[in-house]
Amino acid sequence: MRVARALAALVLLPALSHAHGMRTAYLELTEGAGGSLVATWKTTVPAPGVMAQLGEGCATPDVVDGGTVAFRCDGPLDGRRIAVAGLGPLVTEAVVRVLRTDGAVRSHVVTPDAPAWVIPSIQPWTAVAVDYVRLGIAHILHGADHLLFLLALVLYVRRPRAVLVTETAFTLSHSLSFSAVALGWVHVFAPAAEACIALSLVLVALDVGRAHAERDAARQGAAIALVFGLVHGLGFAGALSEVGLPEHAVASALVGFGLGVEIGQVAFIVGLLLALAALRRVVPVARIALAGSYLVGVTGSYWLCQRLWACFG
């Protein structure tokens, strides 16, 4: 039976191999003199068919360097309609940043439901916060390693009140570390941080699979979340560094991203608790926890080897 569970976990590995990061496109527009515009375009995954549209008055671009494209646009930048075509399951959102000649920065997140944005002359901090809430939700829901860690915590702690305390400790911990990295107070080697996240899955899975784990969970669950939350916060910071922080609303972006991560976490944990309550009616909870420990442990071990290879290979 244990071999079957391990094999089932191995079958899932290819689907989960890209465990971290967002399927996002980035468009940065730098305003130059005389109506010139330099556009930097990139995606985190190969995305044929996903392209930026800068609206009327922009000449056919000439490639300058890789993903950097130079445009000549007629008319002011303010009020220009920017769109990203082809957003969907492959690339789920695009971050648009506009750098003005006067140093002002505008940013927005476009989605498949709202793929266009009209550049405003003034951008309130509330609009930035809403955009980064969306990014935070997207990141936690696309981060399979973070979700598996939350699964392991729920299977270890089990009781709703203890789960709430544990999740709160995890949130406080990762918020501290991702804010410190995003603000430039702490610098980390990203591949090493990703390997440590995978190691956290293995270690927590070993606790979940132990006999009498539930007896120790109430005492140790919050402490485990507090320690490993610092490591997972480094992963959140990596995603945030890809997007960048708007200089005119750093606090709004940080708070919004953290709030989005929290919303995604709570929604996922509530779903897990409901599923666990339904399953334990027909399957002993100890067996559910053991199966979950194999899934998290085997997957975490695979990622650990993969990420250590990235560090030293």
Image (cartoon, helix red, strand yellow):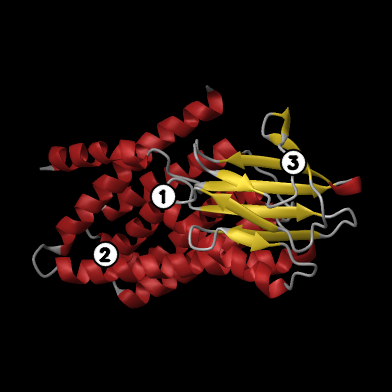
Does the CB distance between marks 1 and 2 fall below 8 Å? no
The percent position of residue 81, horizontal first and vertical second, equals: 68, 59
Residue marked by disc 2: 214
Q: Amino acid at mark 1?
A: Pro
- Distance from label 1 to label 2 (Cα)? 39 Å
In the figure, 22 relative to 279: above or below? above
In the figure, 150 relative to 198: above or below? below
Instruction: Place residue 107 in its image quadrant.
Output: bottom right
Instruction: Place residue 305 in its image quadrant.
Output: top left
| Element class at badge 1 | loop
What is the residue that sits farthest to the bottom in this orientation?
161
The percent position of residue 56, horizontal first and vertical second, equals: 70, 52
Q: Residue at x 11, y 70 (%)?
A: 281
The percent position of residue 4, horizontal first and vertical second, equals: 13, 40
Does the CB distance between marks 3 and 1 fall below 8 Å? no
Q: Earlier in the sequence, mark 3 or mark 1?
A: 3
Residue 293 left/right relative to 145: left
- Distance from label 3 to label 1 (Cα)? 30 Å
Q: Quadrant of the N terminus?
A: top left
Residue marked by disc 1: 89
Q: Residue at x 50, y 35 (%)?
A: 46
The percent position of residue 100, horizontal first and vertical second, equals: 84, 55
Residue marked by disc 3: 59
Of badges 3 and 2, nearer the viewer stands: 3
Q: Is residue 140 visible?
A: yes
| Element class at badge 2 | helix
Residue 213 left/right relative to 87: left
| Element class at badge 3 | loop
Q: Residue at x 72, y 72 (%)?
A: 125
Q: Earlier in the sequence, mark 1 or mark 2?
A: 1
